[in-house]
Every structure is written in C-alpha cells, then in structure tokens.
C-alpha cells in the first residue's frame, strides 16, 4: 500500500517518495529548554514518534534529527533573571526533565540531538555564504537575510510576500536597520551582558532560523525528506529555513514534505505559559499509565487541534484496558488478524490517520477478546504506534548519539 503524506508546501497530500529509496531523513524542530515542557509538546513529539515508527514498520531506514535551541532571547532572559546563570546549566536542567518525560512516554530518542551552541562555526559559515550570495546584508554588527531576494518567499504559507508582511511577525527585531519588513536576523550583535561568539561582524550570537538550517545540513545533508514542527512555526521560522537552505546550497526543494501538527488547547484556549493554563505530561503520567496518555494523544489527528479537558484521559480507562488485555492474549488464529492489519495500514497510509487506525484496532481487540483470534496483528500494529504494553521498542533502543 502507498503512504501519502500531507505537506504544508502546496497544502496537499501526495505519495511519500524519499530522496534515497528505502531511507527517510527527518528533521523536527525541538524545544527551547528555558522552562517546563507541557502537554502540547507531548502531543507533537508523540505524533512524530508514531510517524518515525510507522516508516520503520513500512520498511524504511529512518534518520530522525531533533535540535535543542539553547541560545535565543528566552534562554538569555532566564539567565539574566537568575543572576547570570550559564545558559548551559539552564539547558541541561530543563532538557533532562523534558527527555525523562519523553522517555516515560516511550518516545524514541532522536538519531541525533544537536545543540545550537555546538554549531556556531557552521552558522557563521552559512551566514558568510549567504552574504556572498547577495541575499544577505550586514548592518553594524547585525546580518539580515533579505526576504525579497528569495524568489518564492511565502510559498510555504501559501501567501505572497506582501500578504505576509501584514502578519504579526515574531522576527520584528531591529526594525530600523532592515531593508524590508520580512528580513530576518542571521547573526545579531550581543549586548555586553549577553553570551557572544566572535564573528567577522563582531561579537554576537545567531539568529533563530539559521540555527535549524546549520543543524539540519550538518546532520542530514543539503536536502531532507520530512520537516516537522508545530503549525505555529510555519511563519516565519520554516519559511526562513527554506529561503536560507535553498540560497546557500542552490538545491531545491530543501524539504520534500512539511508536516505540521495542530495546537493543543485547554478547554478551547491555546495552552501557553503566558496564559498560565499549562497541563504537564509529567503530572498526567502520575495519575495514568504513560501508554494511556499516548492513546489519548494519538486519538486526535496530528494536523488537528487537540482540545484537552479534565477527565479526558480517565474517560479512556475502559478502552485502554480492553486494548491491553487483548494484547496479552495468546494467538489462536493468526489469519483472523489480516483485516485489522490492512485497516491499520490503510488508515496510517492516509496521512497518518492514527485515530482511524485506533478505531480499527478497537474492533480487532473486541474480536480477540471474544475468542476470534488476531492477537499477533493487534500487537504488531499497536507496537508500530509506540505502545510499550504491545512490545514497542523502548526510547533508548534507537541509534541515539548525543
Ligand atoms: Zn527549527
């Protein structure tokens, strides 16, 4: 059966054809470890974990890279607030908690897990190359990418550059120095009390989007198959990544499939620190088995917004118990599992429709529990979705390299 994936570039689903046959190169934007991580992060990383496992189940070799944005305005803000505490300390403390949470959720550790601060040389080199290409300019210690010089800037967002310029832009720093409103920082001058690295333009630090370009090229090469992240990263972060990567390598497309997950809401409101409505995966896993939290998270299609309500996970007690019990049964008739296996694959091939796949597996579990057989196929499918109780491989069993 043919796997079809939706790409935000072109806003359509199409057959997944990797650059190299039998291999998938995936880059997913990671966290900025300046604070706690919440259920929205778990929603995103569990779905990308299911994608990764499903590609392996389909017979592909997967390289999955996820970065850590350990130098940016938020990291510096926390460092200052804590009396000049080194950002590496802040990163290590929060990242350890984040990784422990994902380990409990049975999310496979990335093949590579780069820190932006380990890529400063590559970032400086990329910035220099972009200046030489004529698509970037330096102003008094800052270097900007000139968005208007990249043909097709806006394509990922399905918008013209004029339309994008009207949107609220988190990259609006140094407005007075920019040639155009969508120009964004590749390199920025550091204030005296901020971390800095030497560069041809003076002591400074990287812009935001250039970090991902340096890390994805460094770990996966000039072109990748799948780029993942939250939908809130499409503008400007991922639009910028395309502009940078294609300008510096001359190869297009930088990425074949742009996969963006929806946002997690709490009682209909977007979950965010500033609104103070954070629900932590860690707290939920104190009350429920981690696999049951995974069942809850996979119950919403990755591209949709999930709306968490108190009691939503407890409401899955019966469903979870049935799946687990059926998984524990011995196989009595392996042939009986074929329809469930086909239904599972058809749903997942349809842009990773995990909710529909799980419905098929509910029916399969009912059949197993009624003595109709098919337990092996059920275990295999639930394992491909990452459920530990079904024998899915554990978080540390990937080809993780720090
Ligand atoms: Zn990124």
Image (cartoon, helix red, strand yellow):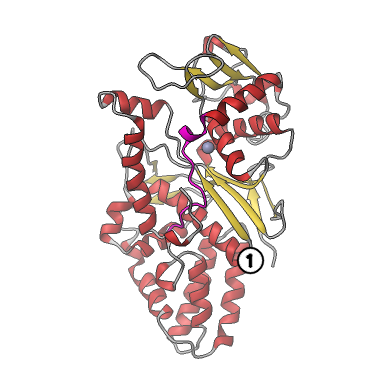
| Mark 1 lies within 8 Å of ligand 1 (Cβ measured) | no
Task: Write the residue at 66% across / 30% down.
Answer: 243
Q: Is residue 336 above or below residue 92?
A: below
Give how far across and how far down residue 171 sits, in percent: 51, 23
**Residue wearing tag 1:** 59
Q: Is residue 162 visible?
A: no
**Vertical relation: 322 (above or below) 162:** below
Q: Could you tell me how many numbered marks the image carries?
A: 1
Q: Residues within 10 Å of mark 1 (few under 14, many from 20)?
A: few
Which residue does the image show at 38% across and 56% down from the upper left? Answer: 103
Question: Does the stretch in magenta take in 285?
Answer: no
- The picture places residue 239, in percent across and down from the top left corner, at 61, 32
Q: Quadrant of residue 153?
A: top right
Residue 280 place in picture, x, y as percent: 31, 48
- Displayed quadrant of residue 276: top left
Tell me which secondary structure the magenta stretch mostly adopts. Answer: loop
Asked whether 117 falls inside the magenta stretch, the response is: yes
Q: Position of residue 163 (x, y in %)?
A: 63, 25
Give the camera-side residue of 117 and 49: 117
**In this image, 386 relative to 256: left or right?**
left
- Residue appearing at x 48%, y 83% in the figure: 367
| Residue 296 visible in this rendered orientation of the protein | yes
Quick check: 30 left or right of 154? left
Residue 248 against residue 378 in the figure, above or below? above
Give the residues in magenta.
107-120
Residue 204, compared with residue 340, is above or below; it is: above
């Amino acid at each position: 059966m043919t796997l079809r994936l939706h790409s935000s570039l072109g806003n359509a689903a199409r057959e997944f054809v990797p650059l190299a046959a039998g291999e998938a190169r995936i880059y997913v934007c990671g966290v900025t470890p300046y604070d706690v991580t919440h259920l929205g992060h778990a929603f995103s990383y569990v779905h990308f974990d299911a994608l990764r496992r499903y590609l392996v189940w389909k017979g592909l070799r997967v390289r999955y890279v996820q970065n850590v944005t350990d130098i940016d305005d938020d990291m510096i803000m926390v460092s200052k607030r804590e009396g000049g505490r080194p950002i590496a300390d802040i990163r290590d403390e929060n990242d350890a908690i984040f990784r422990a949470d994902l380990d409990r959720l049975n999310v496979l550790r990335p093949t590579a897990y780069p820190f932006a601060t380990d890529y400063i040389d590559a970032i400086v080199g990329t910035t220099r190359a972009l200046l030489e290409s004529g698509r970037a300019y330096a102003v008094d210690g800052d270097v900007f990418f000139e968005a208007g010089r990249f043909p097709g800037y806006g394509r990922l967002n399905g918008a013209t550059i004029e339309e994008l310029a009207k949107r609220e832009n988190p990259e609006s720093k140094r407005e007075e120095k920019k040639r155009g409103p969508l120009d964004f920082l590749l390199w920025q001058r550091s204030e005296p009390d901020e971390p800095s690295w030497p560069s041809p333009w003076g002591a400074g630090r990287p812009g935001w989007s250039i970090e991902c370009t340096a890390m994805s090229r460094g770990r996966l090469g000039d072109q990748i198959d799948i780029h993942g992240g939250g939908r809130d990263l499409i503008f400007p972060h991922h639009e910028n990544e395309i502009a940078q990567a294609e300008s510096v390598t001359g190869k297009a497309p930088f990425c074949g499939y742009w996969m963006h997950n929806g946002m997690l809401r709490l009682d209909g409101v977007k979950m965010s620190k500033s609104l103070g409505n954070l629900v932590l995966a860690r707290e939920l896993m104190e009350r429920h088995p981690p696999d049951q939290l995974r069942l809850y998270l996979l119950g919403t299609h990755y591209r949709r917004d999930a709306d968490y309500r108190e009691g939503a996970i407890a409401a899955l007690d019966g469903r979870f118990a049935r799946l687990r019990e059926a998984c524990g049964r011995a196989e009595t008739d392996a042939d009986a599992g074929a329809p469930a296996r086909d239904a599972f694959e058809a749903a997942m091939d349809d842009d990773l429709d995990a909710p529909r796949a799980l419905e098929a597996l509910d029916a399969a579990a009912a059949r197993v529990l009624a003595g109709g057989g098919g337990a092996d196929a059920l275990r295999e499918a639930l394992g491909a979705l990452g459920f530990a109780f079904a024998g899915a491989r554990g978080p540390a069993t990937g080809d993780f390299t720090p």
